[in-house]
Image: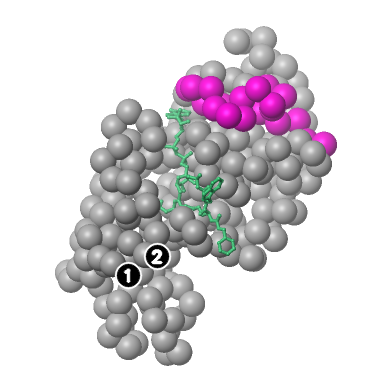
């Protein structure tokens, strides 16, 4: 494994254009439950039963109880070494992009600027009615909400979490920023099971753009065999090991 890390570190130059895509695996060391791993959230709840507009329409109370619980859990968590190395790289490499599928805000709290939030943020809300008086989406870090489901301050209708649910499109501006970041020298996909689209297609798209593609995961995924390098290990150890070789 060490020679693989050396090979990767040797490829990273001061002017390298680096893009990183992260999933729940980078927050695992912070104690944030993943979706599909052991003890994962989807083991308890079916995604279709909670993370869809139809589920919200059917039972906004249940959906908000789940998001309110996740927000309470997240408010006790801190970024880990994986977040911190990514934040350090975001300041060191001039052409650096971070795309995250995570909605937990831990990359921002670790200091990474301009995070591309591919699936939105659990710390943002928007009016379910999209009422004319309310902004498109805004930050609300209330934990716990005094009232479930929370109401829009502008029209007293329902608020919804500012995340992308199954069956919902990715924000076009986010897609545009993502597309530009695929034009890079090195694309790392870290801590994602690579089963949710279109996020799972990004590493292959980057490879098609000529990037050297690397996966960091504790298990193999559907992407492992088609990328240039698959590093088997936890992100909170692998990223600091690579950083140690770069420093
Ligand atoms: C869309 C936000 C179209 C909300 C999430 C059939 C085939 C293909 C696609 C589809 C299909 N049927 C439907 C679709 C589309 C669907 C999809 O892909 N479904 C899948 C399940 C088949 N996609 C969508 O609906 C997307 N939208 O397609 O829109 C459209 C276009 C125009 C107009 C209308 C519609 C939107 C999907 C977004 C869903 N939102 N989250 C919330 O969080 O509440 S999904 C959620 O799961 C995450 O955001 C993430 O994206 C996804 C995957 O999770 P991961 O982050 O990968 O986490 P997971 O637990 O799965 O894996 C953790 C990994 O980490 C594991 O591999 C583990 O080994 C590893 N790990 C653990 N510890 C560590 C580690 N690695 C390193 N170190 C460690 N320490």
SS assignment at label 1: helix
Name the colouring of the figure. Answer: one colour
Above or below, comparing residue 54 to residue 188 in the picture: below
Compare residues 8 and 128 and report the one nearer the observer: 128
User: Label for residue 220?
Assistant: none
Tally the marks: 2
Residue 170 falls in which quadrant of the image? Answer: bottom right
Residue name at image x 33 percent, y 62 percent: 55
Where residue 6 appears, as percent x and y from the top left, is 68, 15
- Label 2 crowd (10 A; few <14 / some 14-19 / many >=20): many
Q: Quadrant of the C terminus?
A: top right
SS assignment at label 2: helix
Residue name at image x 67 percent, y 38 percent: 203
Does 161 appear in magenta? Answer: no
Side of 114 where 152 appears, left or right: left
Q: Which residue is mark 2?
A: 53
Residue 189 falls in which quadrant of the image? Answer: top right
Where residue 111 appears, as percent x and y from the top left, is 50, 49
Residue name at image x 28 percent, y 85 percent: 156
Residue range of the region highlighted in magenta in the rendering: 210-229
Compare residues 202 and 186 and report the one nearer the observer: 202
């Amino acid at each position: 494994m060490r020679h693989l890390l050396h090979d990767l570190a040797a490829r990273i130059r001061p002017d390298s254009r680096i893009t990183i895509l992260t999933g729940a695996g980078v927050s695992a060391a912070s104690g944030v439950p993943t979706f599909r791993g052991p003890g994962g959230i989807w083991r308890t709840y079916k995604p279709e039963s909670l993370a869809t507009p139809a589920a919200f329409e059917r039972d906004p109370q249940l959906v908000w109880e789940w998001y309110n619980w996740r927000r309470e859990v997240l408010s006790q968590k801190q970024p880990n070494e994986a977040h911190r190395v990514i934040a350090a790289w975001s300041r060191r490499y001039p052409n650096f992009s971070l795309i995250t599928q995570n909605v937990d805000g831990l990359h921002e709290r670790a200091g990474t600027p301009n995070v591309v939030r591919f699936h939105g943020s659990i710390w943002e809300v928007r009016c379910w009615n999209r009422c004319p008086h309310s902004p498109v989406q805004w930050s609300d870090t209330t934990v716990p909400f005094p009232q479930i489901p929370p109401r829009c301050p502008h029209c007293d209708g329902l608020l919804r979490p500012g995340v992308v649910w199954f069956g919902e499109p990715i924000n076009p501006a986010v897609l545009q920023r993502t597309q530009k970041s695929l034009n890079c020298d090195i694309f790392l996909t870290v801590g994602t099971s690579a089963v949710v689209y279109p996020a799972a297609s990004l590493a292959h798209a980057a490879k098609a753009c000529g990037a050297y593609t690397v996966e960091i995961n504790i298990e193999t995924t559907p992407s492992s065999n088609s990328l240039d390098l698959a590093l088997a290990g936890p992100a909170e150890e692998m990223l600091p090991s690579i950083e140690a070789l770069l420093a």
